[in-house]
């Protein structure tokens, strides 16, 4: 009988196993494949994910294989810039670079290797999921080898075609976006060539940007990767056949403008349907959907895998509280109310970008370019991180300044904040309160260059309570306000109904 069973050991499932294993829970991981998929799929993550890897104790394993990059550039039909989401010179609120590219087989292997550190964690590779039953207290899993396993809770991290989601009969909410694209991965020994572009900001390095060519003749994306890995994504045009477009001669013709005279080797060419889909229910009994099992996004802002890692970071601390008897099962009902609006906002933004990226009408594309450039005049450009909204419902004091935001992680001397203060619930305040299931930290004692004091001052507060997943629970002023904030947190966790949470 395990505390938690995880179905699927891709990046999201392996990350979940590390987080839960680190918390001391007994965990079973089931993965039908014996080895990580040998070719790249996801390629991008952001600074928040690096902070989560730090929380899970795996950052030293994964950081060396990350390539920090500089954001996104969208180019119009006339090869002029229409949108720039660059990070050069921008703040690094978590002390990590804002964007990274990676090689998925390496990342998966690092996360799997880290699981050996947890004696209460069992992994069964090469064993598929067949079905499940629930009795209100236990989830019983039927496995492909004829065995059965029991757990109090199950997290389904088994991908877009999730067998668990199908077994539960959970439908997907279709955001009405489906476009066929050809994805080409290559090893490139040199610099990618770009057509003559205009309007590129002087600080933008095309070799370090994800460049979206919004060309109605053939929308395409050029993505840098770690080492010499590069990726192209080409939209298939009406009438083109998936299988025909994957043939070596077609692939060579598509990448030739970017690689003429540059030594390279194509390692994969595959067609995909880019979707905008969100599961109608993320929890059924003791089973939770996470990652692609719960939602699928077009890749235009590189947030697909990031969504899944945020999912399990949200679930992990709640499961630990419930399984340790310090919170009721109802706490877990806050998972979807917190994550669904969050995910929906970002997927909707990606779908919106996909609609203008995928325009195939030349006049409509010209009108798009003109209107987007006009809208950008005088406006400060944002980054992909700006797409992530605050948590607006659940375990959060929404009526306080800064509630639901992701809290900063400044450097404290030569270390990072989370490494100095530890994880869990942290109350940053100068008021000497009694500790009540939170770690009390006086910002004045931290050698952080005044970063936390500045964050508090910007919101006109003098206390901030931060959740284990680094989101702000709430803020307050005065000693009594700080005490009330902790009491409010305790009341919410200890038994508030989902209806009261939503209200």
Image: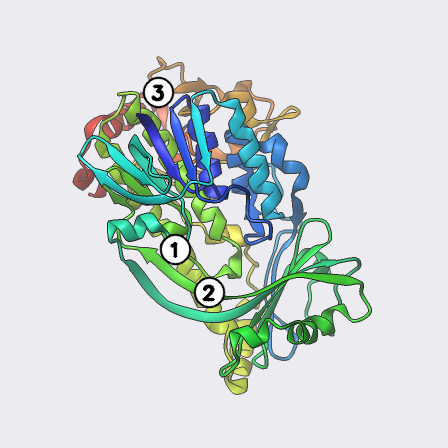
Q: Secondary structure at mark 3?
A: helix
Write the residue at 55% across / 24% down.
Answer: 419
Earlier in the chain: of badge 3 and badge 1, it is 1
Instruction: Please say whether residue 28 is visible from this viewpoint.
Output: yes
Residue 34: x and y, percent?
51, 41
Q: Answer above or below: position of 222 versus 165.
A: below
Q: Nearer the viewer, mark 2 or mark 3?
A: 2
Instruction: Say whether residue 144 is left or right of residue 112.
Output: left
Specify whether 497 is left or right of 435. Answer: left
Residue 458's spot in the image, x, y percent?
A: 47, 38
Q: In the rendered structure, find residue 161 and report the number of the disc placed on it.
A: 1
Instruction: For label 1, count other residues whose C-alpha is less than 10 Å away and answer few (under 14), some (14-19) or many (20+).
Output: few
Q: Earlier in the sequence, mark 2 or mark 3?
A: 2
Quarter of the image that includes the C terminus: top left
> Whole-percent x and y of residue 73?
61, 63
Where on the picture, by quarter, is residue 380? bottom right
Q: Point out the image quarter for the N terminus.
A: top left
Foreground: 393 or 174?
174
Residue where numbered disc 2 is placed: 274
Q: In the displayed image of the protein, which residue is found farthest to the front?
A: 146
Answer yes or no: is residue 458 visible: no
Distance, label 2 to label 3, CA atoms, is 51 Å
Task: Name the spot of residue 63 as percent of width and height, x first.
Answer: 64, 37
Distance of mark 3 from mark 1, alpha carbons? 51 Å
Residue ID for mark 3: 479
Residue sitting at x 66%, y 41%: 65
């Amino acid at each position: 009988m395990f505390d938690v069973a995880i179905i699927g050991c891709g990046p999201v499932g392996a990350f979940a196993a590390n987080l839960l294993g680190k918390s001391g829970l007994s965990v079973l991981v089931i993965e039908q494949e014996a080895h990580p998929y040998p070719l790249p799929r996801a390629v991008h993550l952001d600074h928040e994910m690096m902070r989560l890897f730090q929380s899970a104790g795996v950052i030293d394993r994964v950081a060396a294989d990350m390539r920090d990059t500089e954001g996104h550039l969208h180019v119009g039909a006339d090869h002029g810039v229409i949108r720039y989401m660059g990070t050069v010179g921008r703040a690094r609120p978590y002390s990590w670079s804002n964007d990274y590219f990676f090689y998925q087989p390496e990342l998966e292997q690092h996360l799997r290797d880290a699981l050996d550190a947890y004696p209460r964690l069992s992994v069964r590779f090469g064993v598929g999921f067949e079905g499940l039953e629930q009795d209100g207290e236990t989830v019983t899993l039927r496995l492909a080898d004829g065995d059965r396993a029991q757990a109090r809770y199950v997290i389904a991290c088994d991908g877009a075609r999730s067998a668990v989601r199908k077994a539960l009969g959970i439908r997907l909410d279709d955001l009405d976006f489906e476009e066929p694209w050809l994805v080409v991965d290559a090893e490139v020994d040199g610099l990618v060539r770009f057509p003559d572009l205009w309007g590129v900001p002087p600080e933008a390095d095309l070799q370090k940007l994800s460049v979206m060519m919004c060309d109605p003749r053939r929308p395409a994306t050029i993505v840098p990767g770690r080492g010499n890995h590069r990726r192209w994504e080409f939209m298939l045009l009406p009438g083109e056949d998936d299988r025909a477009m994957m043939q070596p001669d077609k692939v060579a013709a598509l990448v030739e403008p970017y690689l003429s005279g540059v030594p390279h080797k194509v390692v994969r060419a595959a067609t995909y349907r880019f979707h905008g889909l969100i599961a109608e229910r993320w929890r059924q009994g003791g089973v939770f959907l996470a990652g692609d099992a719960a939602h699928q996004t077009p890749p235009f802002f590189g947030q697909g895998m990031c969504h899944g890692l945020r999912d399990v970071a949200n679930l992990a601390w709640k499961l630990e509280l419930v399984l340790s008897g310090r919170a009721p099962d109802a706490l877990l009902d806050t998972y979807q109310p917190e994550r669904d609006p969050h995910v929906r906002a970002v997927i909707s933004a990606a779908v919106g970008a996909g609609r203008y990226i995928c325009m195939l009408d030349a006049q409509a594309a010209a009108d798009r370019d003109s209107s987007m450039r006009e809208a950008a005049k005088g406006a400060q450009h944002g980054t992909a991180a700006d797409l992530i909204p605050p948590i607006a419902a659940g375990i959060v004091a929404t009526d306080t300044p800064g509630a639901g935001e992701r809290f900063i992680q400044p450097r404290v001397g030569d270390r990072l904040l989370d490494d100095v203060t530890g994880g869990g619930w942290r109350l940053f305040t100068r008021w000497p309160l009694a500790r009540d299931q939170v770690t009390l930290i006086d910002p004045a004692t931290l050698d952080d260059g005044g970063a936390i004091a500045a964050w508090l001052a910007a919101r006109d507060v003098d206390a901030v309570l931060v959740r284990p997943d680094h989101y702000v629970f709430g803020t307050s002023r005065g000693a009594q306000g700080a005490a009330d904030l902790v009491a409010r947190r305790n009341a919410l966790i200890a038994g508030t109904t989902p209806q009261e949470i939503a209200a």
